Image (spheres, coloured by chain):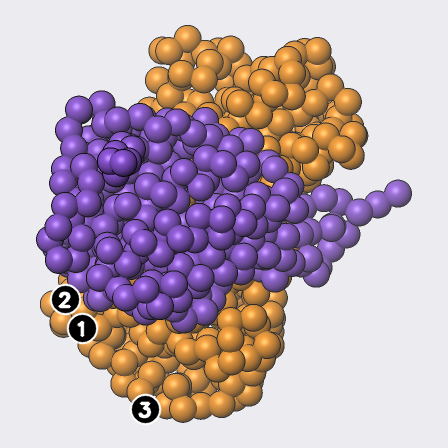
Chain colours: A purple, B orange
Amino acid sequence: MSERLAVKKTYKLYIGGKFPRSESGRSYQVTDSKGRFLANAAWASRKDARDAVAAARKAFPGWSEATAHNRGQVLYRVAEMMEGRRAQFVDEVGSSEGLGRSRAEKVVDEAIDRWVWYAGWSDKIAQVVGSSNPVAGPYFDFSVPEPTGVVAVLAPQRSSLLGLVSVLAPVLVGGNTAVVTSSYERPLPAIALGEVLATSDVPGGVANILTGRVGDTAPTLASHMDVNAIDLAGVAGDDEHAVQLELAATENLKRVVRAPAKEPDWTAEPGLGRITSFLETKTVWHPVGI
Amino acid sequence: MTKFEYAPAPESRAIVDIKSSYGLFIGGRFVDPTQGTSFKSVNPATEEVLAEIAEAGREDVDAAVSAARTAYTKTWSSLSGRDRGKYLFRIARIIQERSRELAVLESIDNGKPIRESRDADIPQVAAHFFYYAGWADKLNYAGFGTNPQPYGVAGQIIPWNFPLLMLAWKIAPALATGNTVVLKPAETTPLSALLFAEICQQAELPPGVVNIITGAGDTGQMLVEHPDVDKIAFTGSTEVGKAIARSVAGTSKKATLELGGKAANVVFDDAPLDQAVEGIVSGIFFNQGHVCCAGSRLLVQESVYDDVLARLKRRLTTLRVGDPLDKNTDVGAINSAEQLARIRELSDVGESEGAERWSPPCELPDRGFWFPPTVFTGVSQAHRIAREEIFGPVLSVLTFRTPAEAVEKANNTPYGLSAGVWTDKGSRILWMSQQLRAGVVWANTFNKFDPSSPFGGYKESGYGREGGRHGLEAYLKVGEAA
């Protein structure tokens, strides 16, 4: 009996809840840590980035107005779906990052648990960072966090899954929608994550994932007038590129999370910084009287 | 409604002692600028020259930053939070004691009615110092982790519309959190900041903790670009705010920006109309409309448009425009010739683009910078007077039919500083306050401020918050992603 011929997967972008190829028709070869061919991944263009922004903007009203409880449920569902695909993620993280099986398993488990951690914040963050303000007058005055809007997320280059989840989940939990550029050399876990998101009740367009060169799409995202914030984690250590993007982001005063000098250790507990960086504080006043 | 004739009731200016010239306040004393250049501060209500003001050049900015750095390293950072707080309490008390002097000086230099400087600006200034004084020894409980750290030297640039209040919004939280500051007041309104420098001396604040340098945009730019400044806080135009954002890009400096606005003030047909009219008036004519969060776009539901306009026009005929030091004055002088020119230009554009202009009959003084309260009707969303910040007593009126249309029009702006909503329906108030993309929403009120209440913008109105617990974050190394 002859060996079964495997069915190979086509690796595509994730935009607006669908899996298109790059409109440019381009792809690039993805290899494992030892240089062996793994797959052809879609090479996203500037047009793909603009399409992704349009999809994210369209999804913003629904996602930002969903109840915090509902967002928490949906993000927890992402963890559930990842758990079901754990073996695939272990394979892809292992080959992408050159990790042995047990280390790859630890990374994947941490990534799944990170979704759980962030999911739980959805209906708690407002109580931690919001306030009732004791103003000197007959007014009821309160401050609540609201999502900033559409956030461009340049995901880390090295940590292809845990790093990716660590920059995407905090953006989504606050009610923002996201356009993510994945690691260039290690895109397969990001593509698999897109497939997980598509089956996790995350509405289409809430998270959009582009594979390809960050240098091709990031300038478009950084200068895009309908993007409200950008996380530069993906250009850590590349000062020249980071400054260019930060400059482009000033055109509409995007909120910027700057690129660190080197990619951080993503295994540490994240803290609230990445959630609050993409939240606005709204203060509401109303008179009190009879 | 008739306007009663009131006899003039001028506040005495004898309480204020304006010197003929002022130096820079660096390292706890007034010094002459290195280059020796100066400019004049004028009373916008009379065009009288008030004083010669030193213009800080590069060496002066260096000296001020260096004084702030030394004070940070040698004294302020090692002082206990309790003692930092006590200095701020002292300052708050002296401001209360000298409040009349500060109010009169502010009205003379800025042109705002004494009623506003006396009853709004100066009490808020004192309250702001009092509020943040109390935080200085409680930072561990502020929700920013244990022992949150200051940045070091803060460079602060403030506008001319609320000179001393903006100073308080900047200096009080900066000092409470343990930073030292170099502050540049606006070119046209430096006097109250220079009097504040004297108050720092009176309070025996350690030299260099507060430095005040005067000058125009160039001085501000030198301060922003100075390599030994750790933190920039700016209130002013969106254009300058973007330039500052570009300047700090690629540095380790942290910036907070409180910029322009084009706030919608939305009036529904079930609103208490007389109250709404008062809110509309205070929303755009308070402080001559020189307010970044001014309600400059009035959105009225079509069914009550005629009624609201009639009441509004009637109310505007009772406004008293004139001498800022007269206690009956409602609307004072435009702050500068330059600002007056901008208001005139945009108003002319409003007419030429087809909107209809109306002002109540009012006599304006012969000297000084004046502009009557002005209402534009028939304004479309594409008109420049509906899109650009005029920063003057000019209201653009638009209409809407449904709540959804109101929201769409209100949010149709790159700004997002503030918004107003007037309705008697509770659920609609809360829905509107969720829908409006702005940092402050005033429901059935407008232009209210409090030291405990966070203030700041969405979108191109800037980032960061001033006031309340949130205001501490701008001056602490917290909240930043790794």
The label on residue A41 is none
Secondary structure under the numbered disc 2 in the rendered image: helix
First in residue order: circle 2 vs circle 3: 2
For marks 1 and 3, give the CA distance: 18 Å
**Residue hosting label 2:** B58
- Which residue is nearer to you in this view: A50 or B456? A50
Secondary structure under the numbered disc 1 in the rendered image: helix
For marks 2 and 1, give the CA distance: 6 Å
The label on residue B62 is 1
Could you tell me the amino acid type at mark 1?
Asp
Query: Does residue A268 sit above or below A181 in this rendering?
Result: below
Q: State if disc 1 and disc 2 touch (CB < 8 Å).
A: yes
Residue A197 picture location, percent across and down: 45, 40
Q: Residue at x 44, y 62 (%)?
A: A109
In what quadrant of the picture does the C terminus of chain B appear?
bottom left
Mark in the foreground, 2 or 3: 3
**Residue hosting label 3:** B74
Q: Residue at x 20, y 40 (%)?
A: A39
**Chain letter of disc 3?**
B
Secondary structure under the numbered disc 3 in the rendered image: helix
Can residue B329 be seen in this snapshot?
no
| Left/right of residue A142 with respect to residue B273 in the rendered view | left
Residue A129 picture location, percent across and down: 58, 59
- Which residue is nearer to you in this view: B76 or B35? B76
| Left/right of residue B376 with respect to residue A8 in the rendered view | right
For marks 2 and 3, give the CA distance: 24 Å
- Which residue is nearer to you in this view: A156 or A4? A4
Q: Estimate how packed mark 1 is, as few (under 14), some (14 to 19) or many (20 or more) residues with alpha carbons within 10 Å.
A: some
